[in-house]
Amino acid sequence: MLGEPQGDRPAPIRDLVASGPERVRLTRYRVSLKAQEALDLPAYLGSTLRGAFGHVFRRVSCLSPQGGPCPAPADCPYHLLFETAPPPDAVALRNLEDVPRPFVIAPAPAGPSRYDTGSEVTFDLTLIGHAQDFLPHFVVTLRELRTLGRGRHPVALRRIETVPLPGGRPTRVYSDEDNLVRSHDASISLAACESSPPPSGRFTLRFVTYTRLKHEGVWAQRPDFHIVLRRLLGRLSSLAVFHCGVRLDADFVGLIEKAKAIALVDDRTRWEDWTRYSSRQDRHMVLGGLVGEATYEGPLDGLWPFVAFGQWTHVGKNATFGLGRYEIVGAGKE
């Protein structure tokens, strides 16, 4: 089950060529864990799930599971997915401190604090680019994720299903009934989003989880559209290069200029702080972000595919554990 991934590895940076968005792909899954005894968990589980998942993933996937230098980081699933670093030939991007990871763990924005025995803890898992090839590693990790939360209460993987586009049907990928990983074809590409026509009038984005958008060195307190798009294009272009093996063939300067013409006509967002515990740094951290709805108006030609696709990649900092999630909740003529 833990054999070599079947897809092609991303090309070295020097070998990348500009390409269309058809190779920028992701797959979305819904994971269900069963509480084997009562659980007391934080209202937002993103950090808790990310920490527990990363610890187990390293144990089952890395040749140096207890820490220390990995003898084969270029081929180690843990280092490729959790500690992604710019390769030596990434001249233009060699100073990036935080290359985006090719997955998103996204629980509900506010779940119950207590789960009774037998109830389910669910969350979405998005795998981007070559991370899709490591699905068996993710399944094994989730199966080996035996406890959750500070009390280390026991949980068990129950099932994994694909999350289809609206109108589609989910596909069962894994079930504890037979312990098998099933093949499927449920990936979504950036190119597919080009076939969806943009709204011709106003549209609304709902920032579901704390959205942290840094602009000109400070955290944005207002979700102006060009700021949202800047951070989204930066994230998507880096994901494309490091995890999909392509460069997006797009006029980013021109797209940002277009975004400046999109007016924020109704801002119903607010800044909220959130405290999480980092086991890696052994300290509590305060992370703030925007939540709420923002309504925009203006021409979206050429911008809409990125906005539509970004719903599943999230936008801004700390997207790996579910921050920066937004939804398109309204579009139409006024």
Image (tube, grey):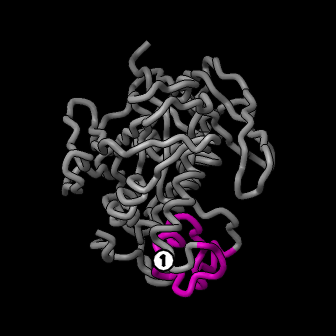
Please state if 39 lies on the left or on the right of 119 as rendered: right
In this orientation, which residue lies closer to the viewer: 240 or 197? 240
**Could you tell me which quadrant the C terminus lies in?**
top left
Tell me which segment is drawn in magenta. 66-94
- Residue 289 at least partly seen: yes
Tell whether 56 sits left or right of 265: left
Q: Who's the residue at 50% across and 83% down the image? A: 14
Magenta part, dominant SS: loop
Give the percent coordinates (x, y) of residue 66: 61, 73
Camera-side residue of 274 and 266: 274
Residue nearest the viewer, comparing 267 with 264: 267
Give coordinates of residue 185: x percent, y percent.
20, 53
Magenta includes 284?
Answer: no
In the picture, measured across the screen, residue 10 lies left or right of residue 181, that is right
Does 85 lie within the magenta span? yes
The picture quadrant where one finds residue 273 is top right
The residue indicated by pointer 1 is: 76
Task: Point out residue 226 in the picture as x, y percentages from the top left corner.
Answer: 62, 40
Q: Residue at x 34, y 60 (%)?
A: 135
